[in-house]
Amino acid sequence: MDMQKLKQLKDGILKFVAENGKVTYAELSKNIDGFNGKYEYRANNKWPNVVLWVGMSKEAVIAIKELVVREKILTPVPALIWDYLYTGQALHLPIAKRPPRTGYKKPHWLPTMLIRTPKHLLDT
């Protein structure tokens, strides 16, 4: 993987979030060079059938994971389906509402937006 490309992607995502406050994955898809591809971004290993977005590049998936999980710069927050319909992009999957303890058997979409992690959460 090209580390320079990953850094440019992360910088582009952070700049776009800073300029817009909160953003959907659809907005990132439309506005960030190198974001689109053939990969899916899923919630985690505990909920493997909870899909956050599809059609992402491998680097975009890694960039989002690093910004959210490792660096904690961005935080995913719930989004309304309208936030995605407004952009003209939504996933054709059932909406994830309350995952069963054993997880969904089939993929479900969890509409989320990314925001800058609030400072009070970074201090803990």
Image (cartoon, rainbow, N blue to C red):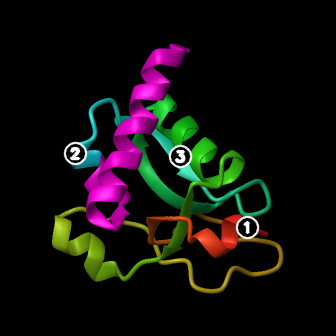
Q: Quadrant of the C terminus?
A: bottom right
Q: In the orientation shown, which residue stands out farthest toward the bottom?
A: 98
Of marks 3 and 1, the one in the foreground: 1
Please name the residue that numbered disc 2 is placed on. Answer: 31
Classify 16 as above or below 50: above
- Sequence-wise, the earlier of marks 3 and 2 is 2
- Quarter assignment of residue 88: bottom left
- Sequence-wise, the earlier of marks 2 and 1 is 2
Residue at (35, 63) in percent of width and height: 24
Per the image, label 1 sits on a secondary structure element best described as loop
Label 1 Cα neighbours within 10 Å, binned few <14 / some 14-19 / many ≥20: few
Residue at (71, 56) in percent of width and height: 44
Please name the residue that numbered disc 3 is placed on. Answer: 64
Residue at (41, 40) in percent of width and height: 56
**Are the residues at dot 3 and dot 2 in contact (C-beta closer than 8 Å)?**
no
Of marks 2 and 1, the one in the foreground: 1
Find the distance from the CA under tag 3 to the CA under tag 2.
Answer: 15 Å
Please name the residue that numbered disc 1 is placed on. Answer: 123
